Image (spheres, rainbow, N blue to C red):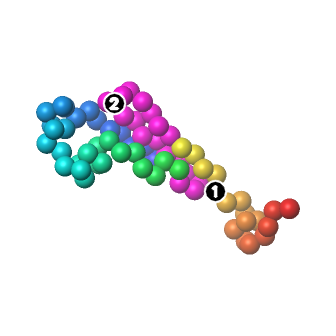
Amino acid sequence: MTIDIRQVCSPAETKTFDTQKLRENYLTEDVFREGEVTMTNSHLDRTIVGGAVAGLVHSQRCGHRAV
């Protein structure tokens, strides 16, 4: 499991951000990764966004098809 914790940026600080810095602080990417549980805790909105995707089962990894 991975947890990304986002701290609050002040409005004055946010005004100075370029596009890259805005993306780093506010965009939540890669929520769904195969075989992982991910969570992002945002103190700005007091929210937790998470995703969970099961990994491949053994038979699928070995090239067998489900019937």
Magenta region includes residue 63? no
Query: Of all residues shown, which one is farthest toward the top?
Result: 46
Q: Position of residue 32 (x, y in %)?
A: 53, 50
How many C-alpha atoms fall within 10 Å of the one at disc 2: few (<14), some, or many (≥20)?
few
Tell me if 28 is positioned left or right of 10 in this view.
right
Nearest the viewer among 31 and 11 is 11
Nearest the viewer among 23 and 59 is 23
Residue placed at 29% from the left, 48% from the top?
24
Is residue 43 in sight in this rendering? Answer: yes
How many C-alpha atoms fall within 10 Å of the one at disc 1: few (<14), some, or many (≥20)?
few
Residue placed at 64% from the left, 52% from the top?
54
Q: Which residue is mark 2?
A: 43
Tell me if 1 is positioned left or right of 22 in this view.
right
Residue placed at 73% from the left, 71% from the top?
62
Is residue 50 positioned above or below 24 on the image?
above
Residue 67: image quadrant is: bottom right
Q: Earlier in the sequence, mark 1 or mark 2?
A: 2
Q: Which residue is mark 1?
A: 55
Q: CA distance from mark 1 to mark 2?
A: 30 Å
Q: Position of residue 29 (x, y in %)?
A: 42, 50
Which residues, given as a range, are shown in magenta?
33-50
Magenta region includes residue 49? yes
Which amino acid type is marked by label 1?
Gly
Tell me if 44 is positioned left or right of 14 in this view.
right
Which amino acid type is marked by label 2?
His
Check disc 1 and report its element: helix, strand or loop.
loop
Is residue 32 positioned above or below 56 on the image?
above
Q: Position of residue 13 (x, y in %)?
A: 15, 37
Residue placed at 46% from the left, 41% from the top?
39
Is residue 1 in sight in this rendering? Answer: no
